[in-house]
Image (cartoon, rainbow, N blue to C red):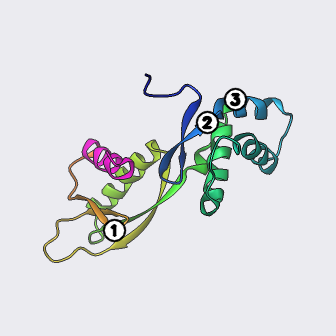
Amino acid sequence: MKCRDAGVDQIRVGVQQVGAVGFRDALKKAAGSGLKGQDEIVEFLMAELEDDNYFPERMKELYRTALWREYLRYSGMDFSRYYSNIAVTVRGGASEARDRFVAVLTTVLQKLELTPIVTFDTPGAEEPGPQLVIDGQTVVQGFHGQPQLEAAIHKTISGW
């Protein structure tokens, strides 16, 4: 038994990785369809994939963005404008250290094809700063470097 089915590709929808059955074939068909506009191509992809995949109504716009991003990737075009957004809170007083932390955080999230929507908050009296909070969960306290930040974020958004 294989761990992955060759017909299932992983794509990022919002901050989640989801499986898409028949995705590569749908991309090939879309590329060869002669369609040009974003809406036309995304509608084509949705129609190609809907029989074998479930698109929850509340996530349809996230799927549409993900499908367009993956089509652009497949076509060799710049897709960075279509990274998924992730809301994060950075706790810590305004300082050079916090600014460096946010710069590294942005770099780490862009590697994961995520665009941070940053909210700043002040730390509590006994909390070391800076701190990163995602979905109400403190991900890191203090800044220990990019590799540790990458590992902590990956664990938080992937679940392992």
Amino acid on which disc 3 is placed: Asp
Report whether 118 appears left or right of 43. Answer: left
Gap between marks 1 and 3, in whole Å?
39 Å
Pointer 3 residue: 25
Estimate the x, y position of residue 115 in percent, counting from the top left.
49, 54
Pointer 1 residue: 136
Report whether 47 appears left or right of 107. Answer: right
**Prevailing secondary structure of the magenta residues:** helix
Mark sitting on residue 21: 2
Above/below status of 49 relative to 105:
above
Residue neighbourhood size for the residue with mark 3, other residues' Cα within 10 Å, grouped as few (<14), some (14–19), many (≥20): some
- Look at 27% across and 41% down and name the residue there: 147
Estimate the x, y position of residue 117 in percent, counting from the top left.
47, 63
Amino acid on which disc 1 is placed: Gly
| Mark 1 / mark 2, whichever is N-terminal | 2
Q: Nearer the viewer, residue 80 or 52?
A: 52
Amino acid on which disc 2 is placed: Val
Q: Quadrant of residue 7?
A: top right
Mark sitting on residue 127: none
Residue extending furthest toward the front:
1
Q: Which residues are magenta?
A: 147-160
- Foreground mark, 3 or 2, reads 2
Q: Are marks 3 and 2 in contact (CB under 8 Å)?
A: no
Estimate the x, y position of residue 141 in percent, counting from the top left.
21, 60
| Mark 1 / mark 3, whichever is N-terminal | 3
Q: Nearer the viewer, residue 16 or 102?
A: 16
Estimate the x, y position of residue 113 in percent, counting from the top left.
50, 45
- Look at 84% across and 33% down and name the residue there: 33
- Foreground mark, 1 or 3, reads 3
Gap between marks 3 and 2, in whole Å?
9 Å
